[in-house]
Amino acid sequence: MIEIALNMLAVTSLYFSISWCLKHQTERDIDDASLIPFADDPEVARRVEQATGKTIEAVQVSDEAVRPPGWGTLKL
């Protein structure tokens, strides 16, 4: 019996903690957050835009990693 009460307390506290964290978020913020996984691939972002009608601000990811000055290939 105590296990059921503890499980219900855990689920209730999880629900209220998530509600408290999302309290100040607008619907637009939540929609933008749900589209973040598609922002790094322009082709996929275009397909999701066509399917949902929502605008995704896609970023262009360079193939080569940006290295600080002095960091390159080691030449011996």
Image (cartoon, rainbow, N blue to C red):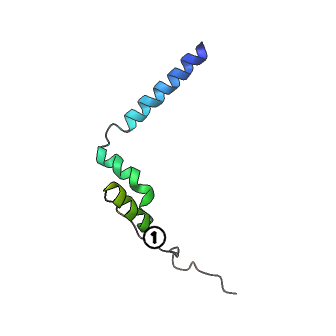
- Number of residue marks: 1
| Residue in view at x 45 percent, y 70 percent | 61
Q: Nearer the viewer, residue 26 or 42?
A: 42
Q: Nearer the viewer, residue 50 or 32?
A: 50
Residue farthest to the top, as pictured: 1
Q: Is residue 58 above or below residue 76?
A: above
Q: Nearer the viewer, residue 48 or 58?
A: 48
| Residue in view at x 47 percent, y 74 percent | 62
Image coordinates for residue 9, horizontal then vertical, percent = 50, 21
In which image quadrant can residue 5 be found?
top right
| Residue in view at x 42 percent, y 35 percent | 18
Tell me the quarter of the image containing the C terminus.
Answer: bottom right
Image coordinates for residue 64, horizontal then vertical, percent = 52, 76
Residue farthest to the bottom, as pictured: 76
What is the crowding at mark 1: few (fewer than 14 residues within 10 Å), some, or many (at least 20)?
few
For mark 1, give the secondary structure.
loop
Residue 72 lies left or right of residue 17; in this view the side is right
Residue 3 lies left or right of residue 68; in this view the side is right
Image coordinates for residue 66, horizontal then vertical, percent = 50, 74
Residue farthest to the right, as pictured: 76
Residue farthest to the front, as pictured: 51
In which image quadrant can residue 44 be found?
bottom left
Q: Which residue is mark 1?
A: 61
| Residue kind at label 1, given as amino acid type | Val
